[in-house]
Image (spheres, rainbow, N blue to C red):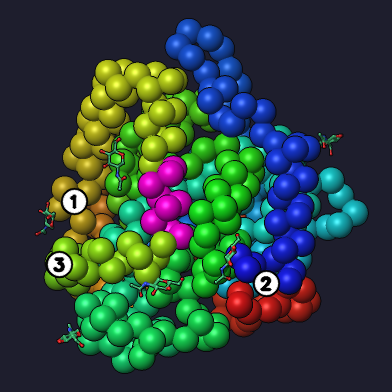
């Protein structure tokens, strides 16, 4: 089966959604040039692991922060929304079952479970996510989650893929990091039966629930498409890459390894190929490649200007070289995560703008938590006290 017994119920609800409240016309209903539209301020971002999603999260943080919008933040200052368990509304600080859904932006890591998300976010919310080529994703995941059960004993990704039965056990609670991570984050069984029919059902369900799927290999095009769909300005989606690795922890993969990843991550591969195709169809149908290219160039120019204004070294630097601890990203696994230094001597407003652009997600998340819940003492090291709903393994 594609899913466990409860997962089957989930699929039933998805089918209802498909024929019930499916999104009107996908998200192609974004503004065309000249027409007026209202910027969307209710947004659900499924933050898929290892897919440039930290950079997207920073864009959402800054958009909401400068407009004083409310975020669906993890309870007690936790860093994720009950991940790797299925998302539950009780994982959100300030959620009340008695009130109508009220938050503006939800963007922390979660394992997607639409019926619970709908309890927290208004029914007009815009749902989107970003996918990454599973070949790049798995290479990155191996470096970042080297300590996970499946990867810990393998010398390198080649060795792991050469004999997965030796290293991989579907029943470990962190097995998703080694197989079909995107499939898992979207709420499906990463060890499932990926028959053509099941994959089609999954794709249709995701299409019904999400307005837009972006592609991290085409990050700038993705940001242009996003601002069009949300009726935001290009300035709202300018960013510097966050949580990215230094080149020394990236490894070159052989052709053979690449083919093995495709078949090992069969479900993720099909997910990616499908939504990469619809991504380009959306560009062609909505704005055309020429206008897209113009907008991408404008976005890149804005990024370069900001780098000149903000960054002491003009770009990213190694973790050792980051002077301000408030701007130092979490170092994890074998990956060396790069960061930035802000130019000294900037005026207050510019300094704050620059700082927000390069503040790593954990620090920014804490800032937003303190802003939204000033009366609460933040205890980030304490595990959140949550009911044991959906507390099960994914097999
Ligand atoms: C956000 O809140 C702060 C503090 O209350 C206030 O000074 C600022 O004007 C608000 N900004 C917007 C855009 O509402
Ligand atoms: C959306 O939510 C609003 C306010 O909670 C409610 O009045 C409305 O009926 C809902 N619409 C749908 C289609 O569920
Ligand atoms: C992969 O397995 C083959 C056959 O078992 C072996 O000859 C080869 O050295 C292995 N390669 C790696 C990278 O472990
Ligand atoms: C996978 O699912 C298909 C139906 O979608 C079924 O025909 C097939 O037997 C299943 N395979 C396994 C190994 O369970
Ligand atoms: C890292 O690799 C990328 C792509 O190969 C390259 O463009 C970039 O210049 C490299 N960065 C450093 C600091 O070597
Ligand atoms: C993604 O789409 C682009 C544009 O059509 C294409 O060039 C590329 O090969 C596609 N990638 C994959 C993995 O399908
Ligand atoms: C290369 C490889 O190990 N592929 C595996 C991918 O996963 C399916 C089951 O989901 C296995 O049958 C393949 O052997």
Q: CA distance from mark 1 to mark 2?
A: 46 Å
Q: Is residue 224 magenta?
A: no
- The residue nearer to you, when weighing 108 against 284, is 284
Viewed as shown, does residue 174 lie left or right of 319? right
Q: What residue is shown with label 2?
A: 4
Q: Which residue is the extreme one toward the top? A: 34
Residue at the image point whose x is 62% and y is 26% from the top: 25
- Name the element at disc 1: loop
Q: Position of residue 294 (x, y in %)?
A: 26, 21
Residue at the image point whose x is 22% and y is 69% from the top: 257
Q: Position of residue 136 (x, y in %)?
A: 28, 60
The crowding category of the residue bearing disc 3, from other C-alpha atoms within 10 Å (few below 14, some 14 to 19, many at least 20), is: few
- Name the element at disc 2: loop
Relative to residue 136, is residue 380 depicted above or below?
below
Q: Position of residue 16 (x, y in %)?
A: 77, 45
Q: CA distance from mark 3 to mark 1?
A: 30 Å
The crowding category of the residue bearing disc 2, from other C-alpha atoms within 10 Å (few below 14, some 14 to 19, many at least 20), is: some
Residue at the image point whose x is 33% and y is 42% from the top: 219
Magenta span covers which residues?
267-275
Q: Nearer the viewer, mark 3 or mark 1?
A: 3
Of the residues under marks 3 and 2, which one precedes in the sequence?
2
Can residue 203 be seen here? yes
Q: What residue is shown with label 3?
A: 254
In the figure, residue 67 lies in which quadrant? top right
Which quadrant does ligand 6 occupy? Answer: top left
Relative to residue 229, is residue 177 depicted above or below?
below
């Amino acid at each position: 089966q594609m899913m466990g017994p409860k997962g089957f119920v989930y699929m039933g609800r998805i089918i209802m959604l498909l024929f019930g409240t499916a999104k009107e016309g996908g998200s192609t209903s974004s503004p065309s040039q000249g027409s007026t539209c209202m910027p969307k301020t209710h947004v659900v971002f499924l933050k898929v692991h290892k897919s440039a999603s930290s950079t997207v999260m920073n864009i959402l943080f800054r958009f909401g922060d400068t407009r004083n919008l409310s975020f669906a933040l993890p309870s007690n200052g936790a860093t994720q929304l009950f991940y790797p368990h299925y998302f539950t509304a009780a994982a959100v600080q300030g959620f009340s079952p008695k009130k109508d859904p009220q938050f503006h932006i939800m963007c922390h890591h979660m394992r997607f479970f639409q019926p619970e998300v709908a309890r927290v976010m208004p029914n007009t919310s815009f749902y989107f996510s970003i996918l990454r080529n599973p070949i790049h994703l798995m290479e990155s995941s191996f470096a970042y989650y080297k300590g996970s059960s499946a990867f810990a004993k393998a010398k390198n990704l080649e060795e792991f893929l050469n004999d997965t039965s030796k290293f991989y056990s579907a029943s470990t609670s962190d097995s998703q990091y080694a197989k079909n991570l995107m499939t898992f984050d979207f709420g499906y069984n990463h060890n499932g039966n990926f028959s053509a029919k099941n994959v089609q059902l999954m794709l249709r369900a995701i299409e019904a629930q999400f307005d837009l799927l972006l592609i991290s290999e085409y990050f700038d095009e993705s940001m242009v498409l996003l601002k069009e769909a949300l009726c935001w300005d290009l300035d709202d989606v300018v960013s510097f890459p966050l949580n990215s690795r230094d080149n020394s922890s990236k490894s070159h993969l052989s052709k053979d390894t690449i083919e093995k990843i495709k078949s090992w991550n069969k479900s993720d591969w099909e997910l990616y190929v499908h939504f990469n195709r619809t991504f380009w169809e959306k560009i062609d149908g909505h704005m055309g490649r020429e206008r897209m290219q113009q907008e991408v160039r404008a976005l890149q120019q804005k990024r370069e200007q900001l780098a000149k204004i903000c960054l002491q070294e003009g770009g990213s630097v190694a973790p050792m070289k980051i002077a301000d601890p408030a701007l130092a990203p979490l170092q994890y696994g074998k990956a060396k995560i790069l960061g930035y230094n802000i130019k000294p001597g900037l005026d207050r407003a510019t300094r704050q703008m620059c700082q927000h652009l390069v503040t790593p997600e954990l620090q920014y998340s804490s800032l937003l938590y303190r802003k939204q819940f000033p009366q609460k003492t933040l205890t980030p090291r304490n595990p959140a006290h949550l009911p044991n709903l959906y507390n099960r393994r994914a097999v």
